[in-house]
Image (spheres, helix red, strand yellow):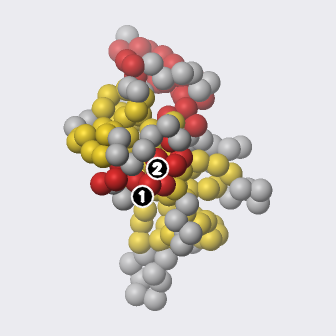
Amino acid sequence: MSKTMAMRHQMMQCYNFYTKKPIDSHAVEVGPGNVVALADVDAGLCIADILGNFSVHDDVYMAKWVTIHGISYRSDMFLVVAVSQEGQPVFCRIRHILLLAAKPYLVVEQWLTNDFDRHNYAFCVQRDQSGIISILGAESILDYYPLSIKESFASDNNHLYLVMRHKPWY
């Protein structure tokens, strides 16, 4: 009985993730954090410009983590947010998690995807020097599964890698 219920629950979660159902308040759990002025946040001016109706003197709640439909997101995790014209994933690093009007938003910075390393079976990435900042709602994430960055242990290899479990854009 319990295995059948677990499988049905997992299938329902997959269905909810891929149908992009709107996120209700019961699906979101917000962790501890602080109320801060946007002026005190790094890239606060850029965030205020993107939001439009906020100034750098407005207060926002900055959470340490947020859980959406059972998936936890924290700062310094990576997400796939788009696919380039060449078919390469576009990765973004989560810088901050903001709560605005009771909805979670992820402040992310875009990283460059260099290539796919077949030996490590991972995407080789590097920080984008342009520092492109954007704000994502939870509904606009292409793949809900967060990634973490790995370094090579070889002394002659200083690349950073992101390993994906699957390709969600096929």
Which quadrant is the N terminus positioned in?
A: top left
* Mark 1 secondary-structure assignment: loop
Could you tell me if the residues under marks 2 and 1 are in contact, i.e. CB atoms within 8 Å?
yes
The circle drawn on residue 167 is none
Q: Please determine whether, in this image, residue 99 is positioned above or below residue 163.
A: above
From what the image shows, is residue 73 above or below residue 122?
above
Assess disc 1: are there few (<14), some (14-19) or many (≥20) residues with their C-alpha within 10 Å of its C-alpha: some
Residue 77, horizontal then vertical, whole percent: 41, 53
Is residue 30 toward the left or the right of residue 11 in the image? left
Element type where label 2 sits in the image: helix
- Which residue is located at x 59 percent, y 66 percent? 112
Decide: few, some or many residues near mark 2? Use Cα within 10 Å; few <14, some 14-19, many ≥20: many
Q: Amino acid at mark 1?
A: Ala
In the rendered image, which quarter is residue 15 located in? Answer: top right
Q: Residue under circle 1?
A: 43
Per the image, the residue denoted by label 2 is 47
Question: As drawn, which residue projects farthest toward the top?
Answer: 1
- Kindly report the distance in space between the C-alpha atoms of the residues bearing marks 2 and 1: 6 Å
Q: As rendered, which of 161 and 75 lies closer to the eye?
A: 75
Amino acid tagged 2: Ile
Coordinates of residue 147 in the picture (x, y in percent): 45, 52
Q: Nearer the viewer, residue 87 or 90?
A: 90
For the question of whether residue 165 can be seen, the reply is: no
Q: Position of residue 159 (x, y in %)?
A: 49, 76
| Residue 2 position (above or below residue 113) | above
Residue nearest the observer in this picture, 16 or 74: 74
Front position in the image: 68 or 18: 68
Determine the residue located farthest toward the bottom in the rendered image.
156
* Residue at left offset 71%, top offset 43%: 170
Q: Measuring 60% from the left and 41% from the top, which residue is drawn there?
A: 142
Image coords of residue 39 (percent x, y): 34, 53
**Up-down relation of residue 57 to residue 125 (above or below):** above
